[in-house]
Image (spheres, rainbow, N blue to C red):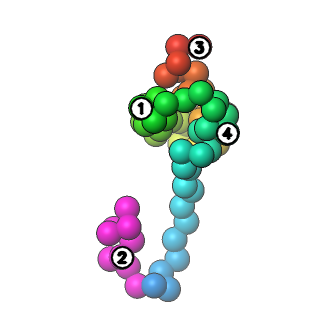
Amino acid sequence: MASHLLQYPADTLCLSSLWFEDDFLSLDDTLTPDEIAQAMDVADDRHDACIGLNWDSLQAAIDYVKGD
């Protein structure tokens, strides 16, 4: 992602939403690094683009990965 952003001038307008490992752990502190990676993939693939990524979509992805 950083290399993509570096293609633009520093004053180019941009909007992004970033979610990190700690965000997933704040919802479920028992997640392994592999489960977090899987949940990130699920959240990316299955979220509603009209709503975007949010705490509910992250929790749904975690539940999916853990089979809840």
Q: Which comes sooner in the sequence, label 2 or label 4?
A: 2
Instruction: Work out how far the residue at label 2 is from the one at label 4, CA to CA, in angstroms.
Output: 31 Å
Task: Give the magenta part as a residue range.
Answer: 1-9
Q: Position of residue 41 (x, y in %)?
A: 42, 36
The dot on residue 34 is: 1
Question: Is residue 7 placed above or below 43 in the rendered structure?
Answer: below
Q: Which comes sooner in the sequence, label 2 or label 3?
A: 2
Question: Regarding mark 1 in the picture, which secondary structure is present there?
Answer: helix
Instruction: Work out how far the residue at label 2 is from the one at label 3, CA to CA, in angstroms.
Output: 40 Å
Mark 2 vs 1: CB contact within 8 A = no
Mark 2 vs 3: CB contact within 8 A = no
Residue located beneath label 2 in the image: 6
The residue at 63%/32% (across/down) is 29
Instruction: Work out how far the residue at label 3 is from the one at label 4, CA to CA, in angstroms.
Output: 17 Å
The amino acid pointed to by label 1 is Asp
From the viewer's perspective, is 35 left or right of 15?
left
Mark 3 or mark 4, which is nearer to you?
4
Locate residue 1: give its quadrant.
bottom left
